[in-house]
Amino acid sequence: MCCRLGGAVARRAEVIGIVEAGYPDYFEEVAPDVYITRWSNNGVCPYLDGSRCSIYEMRPLRCRAFPVFQTDDGSVFLALCPLVSTMSQKDIVALRDLLAQCPLNELRIAGDYLRPHRKTIQRRLSIFQIQQLASASASGTMIEMNERMMR
């Protein structure tokens, strides 16, 4: 997700890579192989340094995929932020397909962990128009309008 929406969901191998590269460990294990950055007072990713990601080269998959993101029910969305103007349709499809391969249980666990912060996340996410991306197996247009927000 966007660094200002609360931080990163990561797998164990991603966290190990970040820590072994010499970065501080701001992750909390919330389940086996599911980590999330600790929620700070301001709800911003602790790796965000001003407007720059301090772990950009090794940021977790879900960070690399933004503005494409997945909710804890597996739905995939596109946040229409300024970054989208630099992306091709092919880039968006590739990120959607990459996220679709991630285990849904990770998202459910992260969603449960972040439930106390849901209103803050929804408020921050509401600054973007959101479009639901059709699944890789769906026919028809790739992007379907959907105003559903994270639950």
Image (spheres, grey):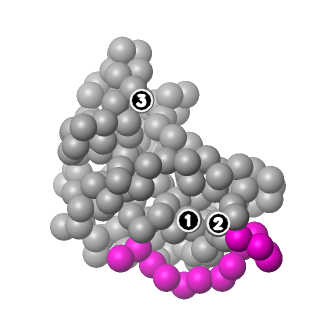
Camera-side residue of 64 and 72: 72
* Amino acid under disc 2: Ser
Q: Is residue 11 left or right of residue 62?
A: left
Q: Which residues are magenta?
A: 138-151
Give the residue drawn at x 26%, y 28%. 25
Report if residue 6 is visible in the image.
Answer: no
Q: Secondary structure at mark 3?
A: helix
Q: Residue 36 location, x and y as percent? A: 29, 44
Residue bearing mark 2:
135
- Do residues under tags 2 and 3 come within 8 Å of each other at their CB atoms? no
- Do residues under tags 1 and 2 come within 8 Å of each other at their CB atoms? yes
Give the residue drawn at x 52%, y 59%. 69
Q: Is residue 39 left or right of residue 48?
A: left
Q: Nearer the viewer, mark 1 or mark 2?
A: 2
Q: If you read the primary sequence from the N terminus, does the residue marked by circle 2 or circle 3 appear first?
A: 3
Up-down relation of residue 139 to residue 104 (above or below) = below
Label 1, label 3: how far apart the Cα atoms are: 22 Å
Q: If you read the primary sequence from the N terminus, does the residue marked by circle 1 or circle 2 appear first?
A: 1
* Amino acid under disc 3: Glu
Up-down relation of residue 86 to residue 12 (above or below) = below
